[in-house]
Amino acid sequence: MNELSQSRHDYGNYQKTEYTRVIMQRPTGVTITAILMAANICVDVYHALHTAPITVPNPDPATTTSHVMLLVHIGLVGLLAFEAISIIGYWLGRTWGRWLIIAGSLYFLFGLKSLPRDLHRSPFVVGMDVYSAALAVYLLWYLHTAYVRTWFQARSHHQPELATGK
């Protein structure tokens, strides 16, 4: 945290005021949830690579499928990069990272409305959906606690002159 802590020292006829920087440590929950989110992404990628490929209906297999599949894969890589950047921003204490995680959690929870009809899928996929939902609910609560909000606010209002002592 980039607040200054003021302390007064009495030296006979005068008082000396010293300012020291108060540093607020990263909440342990931020690190743990960042690791859990990264692990969730890794499991999703692993599962996606080991399941049946995406099929696209096409009249001409030589051209349409290859172009559509290329676009699908580029989109998935872009989404993966976006998720990784969001988690890194979250872990570093950036306010935009916090908001992206909150938005992603809400987006995931709204997408769960199809879970009852998808219960015929593999137990692994359903288990991952339940795990992800529990993580999303926890994140929505955790990211609104006073200590965590204060930490994100302090990290986003970083003042370099305080860090260098100038």
Image (tube, rainbow, N blue to C red):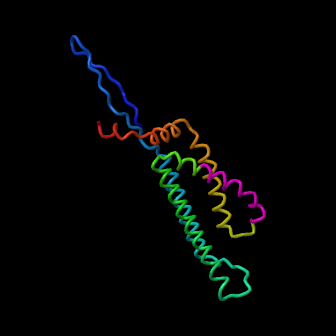
Q: Quadrant of the image for the N terminus?
A: top left
122 in relation to 22, above or below: below
Residue at the image point whose x is 53% and y is 48% from the top: 96
Magenta part, dominant SS: helix
Q: Nearer the viewer, residue 67 or 55?
A: 67
8 drawn magenta? no
Residue furthest left in the image? 12
Front-most of 36 and 92? 92
Indicate left or right for 3 with 82 as reference. Answer: left
Residue lying at 65% horizontally and 89% vertically, measured from the top left:
62
Quarter location, residue 17: top left
Q: What residue appears at the point 47 percent right and 50 percent down from the top-left corner?
A: 91
Which quadrant would residue 108 be assigned to in this image?
A: bottom right
Q: Position of residue 98 (x, y in %)?
A: 54, 47
The quarter in which the C terminus is drawn is top left
72 to 31, vertically: above or below = below
Query: Which residue is located at x 62 percent, y 82 percent?
Result: 66
Image-quadrant location for residue 159: top left
- Return the residue found at the far right: 117
Magenta-drawn segment:
102-118
Whether 115 is among the magenta residues is: yes
Tell me: 104 left or right of 34.
Answer: right
Residue 58 position, x and y percent, is: 72, 83
- Residue 78 drawn at (x, y percent): 55, 66
Give the side of residue 138 with respect to residue 30, left or right: right
**Which residue is more in the foreground, 123 or 94?**
94
How many badges with numbers are in the image? 0
Residue 82 as seen in the image, left or right of residue 64? left
